[in-house]
Amino acid sequence: MAKEQKLKSISVLIPLEKVEASLTEIGFLLQDSATIVADGKFWKRMLYAKGDETISVSEEIGDVYPKDPIITICGSKSTITHVVRGVGG
């Protein structure tokens, strides 16, 4: 039977390097990272895991100016070509 888990979100005022070191010290490994846009800012989001536990760490990396849309396409070459031409690329 799986151990009961809790959900907790916290804001910390320490450098990312210290957070990473603390997670590594207790056995968490970086699984993946991505840059996202939320609330008018760029964020680096990192996912750490140890067994069935996960920790997501988000670091603000800057303001989004100008606030243009970002288009991410998972599709065929013809779809990508059509969308790029349609938006002036």
Image (spheres, grey):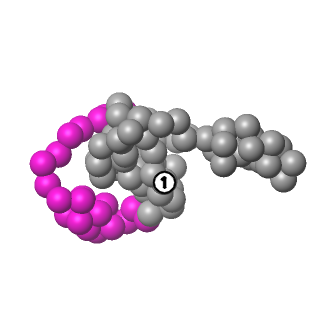
Total labels drawn: 1
Say which quadrant the N terminus sits in. top right
In the picture, measured across the screen, residue 47 lies left or right of residue 1, that is left
Q: Judge left or right: residue 28 versus residue 20.
A: right
Q: Residue at x 29, y 48 (%)?
A: 62
Residue at 43 percent of width and 40 percent of height: 37
45 or 42, which is in the foreground?
Answer: 42
Residue 9 among magenta residues: yes
Q: Is residue 17 visible?
A: yes
Q: From this viewpoint, which residue is outermost toward the left? A: 13
Report the residue at 51% width, 49% height from top: 52
* Residue 75 visible within the image: no
- Residue 81 horizontal/vertical position (percent): 79, 49
Which residue lies at the image location 43% right of the left edge and 65% below the top edge? 29
Pointer 1 local density, CA inside 10 Å: few below 14, some 14–19, many at least 20 = few
The type of residue carrying mark 1 is Ala
Residue 14 in percent (x, y) is at 14, 55
Report the span colored magenta: 5-29
Occupied quadrant, residue 6? top left
Residue 7 inside the magenta-drawn segment? yes
- Residue 88 location in percent, x, y? 66, 42
Quarter location, residue 30:
bottom left
Q: Residue 28 falls in which quadrant of the image? A: bottom left
Nearest the eye: 13 or 84: 84
Drawn side of residue 57 relative to residue 33, left or right:
left
Q: Secondary structure at mark 1?
A: strand
- In the picture of the structure, the residue carrying the numbered disc 1 is 34
Residue 67: horizontal and vertical position, in percent? 41, 35
